[in-house]
Amino acid sequence: MASTPGGETPQLRVLGVDPGLTRCGLGVVDVARDRRATLVGVGVVGTSADEPLDARLLVIARSIDEWLDRYEPEVVAVERVFSQLNVSTVMGVAQASGIVIAAAARRGIPVALHTPSEVKAAVTGSGRADKAAVTRMVTKILRLEASPRPADAADALALALAHAWRGAAPGSPSAVGRTTAMTASALTPAQRLWAEAESKARRKT
């Protein structure tokens, strides 16, 4: 759990991952209970199609491990794989996703899957927004001087923001209070602090 100077306002740290073999976008944000978001880290892991599959997956695995250890996110948000993509693309995305999910599971970090339309709607207000619109809003929300490039990096940040704001997936702090299926015992101590702070903030509005 990240915090502002003085530790007064708990912040949720989310690692967003836009999975892919050629380019895997990574973005870490801290989001306060008032929804104010701050960029922590962003980047893209690239692999060449000329390399063997096992070598490409190893590069992604090592990079994910490094990011999880460096930034210690409370949750990992990953884009859900869609079948309308061509088969080779689906396979690559699914393989990269599996690497990410397994790495988070080894550390006991919850993983949330969000569809592209969910992410677009959360960040731009429209589930049909294009990549340029998502990038513009991510830049504005995070108060960046320059837009994250390439688009995979912006998409990863959008995933992180969408999860923190929408909390649509089981186990996300924002889902607490919206479903009777979620209990306090299912959350980590840091997530419980976030949920309590978010609940108090809602009561004040």
Image: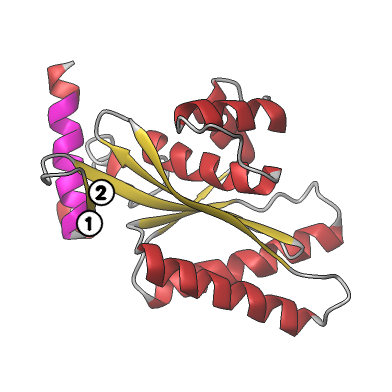
Magenta stretch in the rendered image: 189-201
Residue 11, image quadrant: top left
Per the image, is 49 magenta?
no
- Name above or below for residue 89 compared with residue 159: below
Looking at the rendered structure, which numbered label has been put on residue 178? none
Residue 128: percent from left, percent from top: 68, 25
Q: Residues within 10 Å of mark 2 (few under 14, many from 20)?
A: some
> For this view, does 124 lie left or right of residue 13?
right
Q: Amino acid at mark 2?
A: Met
Tell me the quarter of the image containing the C terminus. top left
Tell me the quarter of the image containing the N terminus. bottom left
- At x 16%, y 58%, the residue is 189
To which residue does mark 1 refer?
187
Q: Amino acid at mark 1?
A: Leu
Residue 114: percent from left, percent from top: 54, 45
Residue 188: percent from left, percent from top: 21, 60
- Name above or below for residue 127 compared with residue 166: above
Per the image, is 197 magenta?
yes
Q: Is residue 130 visible?
A: no
- Name above or below for residue 128 compared with residue 17: above
Marks 2 and 1: in contact by CB < 8 Å?
yes
Q: Residue furthest top?
A: 205
Residue 201, image quadrant: top left
Q: Is residue 5 visible?
A: yes
- Rounded to the nearest angstrom, the CA distance separating label 1 from label 2 is 9 Å
Please report whichever mark, 1 or 2, sits nearer to the chain's N-terminal start: 2
- At x 48%, y 74%, the residue is 65
Tell us which disc is closer to us: 1 or 2. Answer: 1
Q: Residue furthest right?
A: 50
Instruction: Give the total number of marks visible in the rendering.
Output: 2
Looking at the rendered structure, which numbered label has been put on residue 182? 2
> For this view, does 15 lie left or right of residue 61?
left
